[in-house]
Each structure stands twice: as C-alpha cells, then as structure tokens.
Image: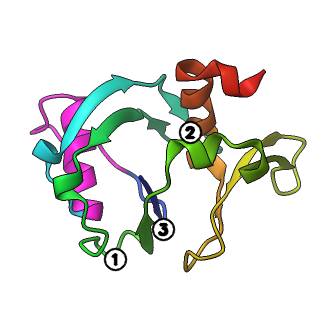
Amino acid sequence: MYSSGQTKRIIYNPTDESLEHTALRETEEEIGLPPQAIEILGRYSALPNKTGSLRVHPYVGFVKNDYIDLTRFNPEEVSSVFTLPVDYLVDPKNRQVKQFRDSQIKYTVFKAPNSLEGEKEIWGLTGFILEGVFRKIIPEYYK
C-alpha cells in the first residue's frame, strides 16, 4: 500500500508505546487502517530524509483484505491511496533508475499504471525504501 501526499514531520508521541505503535497510529490517522488490520512483518533500517531533518522508521506489514477501504483517507494529509501487487512493482518494465532532481543521486522510480488517477510514479524516499525492502526480501528480482 502506498500513500502519496504532502510530507509531514511525525514526532514520536510520548503516549506511543513504541515506534511500531507510532507507525500503526499514523497509518490509521492518514489512511484509515486500524492497527488490528495490519500484521507487522518486520522493520526496515531507519534512515534520514534528504535534508537530514528527520529519521524515518519504516515498517513492513500485511494488510488483511477485510480492512482495505481506499476511500477512508485523510485528505488533509494524503492526496490519494492505491494498492499495487508486489509482482507488478518488481517487474523490471515498471521500474527505472532516474536522477534525483539536479543532484548526482540516482534511485529507482516505480511507475504506476496509467489507469490510476493522480501521481504516476512512486519516487523519493518512498521509492528508495520500497526498493530496499524488495532487495532484502526478494533479491532474485534484482540480479
């Protein structure tokens, strides 16, 4: 699942029991998925955003089908929500390496199907994390 929209700074809330709890709380606030809808499968390495102003602590989870409702997102935080199968994302024809803006940094961009409304690419920090997770759990797609 991917949410696209404006980036906001998430401060670890002292009432959160853990960073995992923070991730689950934020997911519910942003895209309406309650914590019981997600089975956490693991945690990816924490990494900074491009300016180094914050650290992102990504979690990988399985969303139970009974809970998927792509209309329950918070439009003040997220512009759209959609799902794509892993097979689609790891298909080499749906991803390419691009240069990031005016920098020398290159990273993978995942192309969304033309049938989706809104943004047609998964890029930036989200794309970087997604590729990193795939390289760890299904390395055979990156030979």
Identify the residue shown where x is 56% and y is 34%.
Answer: 48
Q: At which x and y percent is residue 111? A: 69, 59
Residue type indicated by callout 3: Gly
Of 73 and 21, which appears nearest the observer? 73
Q: Earlier in the sequence, mark 1 or mark 2?
A: 1
Mark 3, residue position: 5
Identify the residue shown where x is 31% and y is 45%.
Answer: 11
Q: Using residue 79 as the reference point, say whether residue 116 is left or right of it.
A: right
Residue type indicated by callout 1: Glu
Q: SS of the residue at dot 2?
A: helix
Q: Which mark is residue 130?
A: 2
Q: Earlier in the sequence, mark 3 or mark 1?
A: 3
Mark 1, residue position: 76
Q: SS of the residue at dot 3?
A: loop
Q: Using residue 100 as the reference point, say whether residue 84 is left or right of it.
A: left
Q: At which x and y percent is residue 96? A: 80, 48
In this rendering, which labeled residue sits more in front, label 3 or label 2? 2
* Looking at the image, residue 41 lies above or below residue 124: above
Q: Earlier in the sequence, mark 3 or mark 2?
A: 3
Identify the residue shown where x is 65% and y is 50%.
Answer: 124
Query: Which portion, as a residue range, is magenta?
Result: 10-31
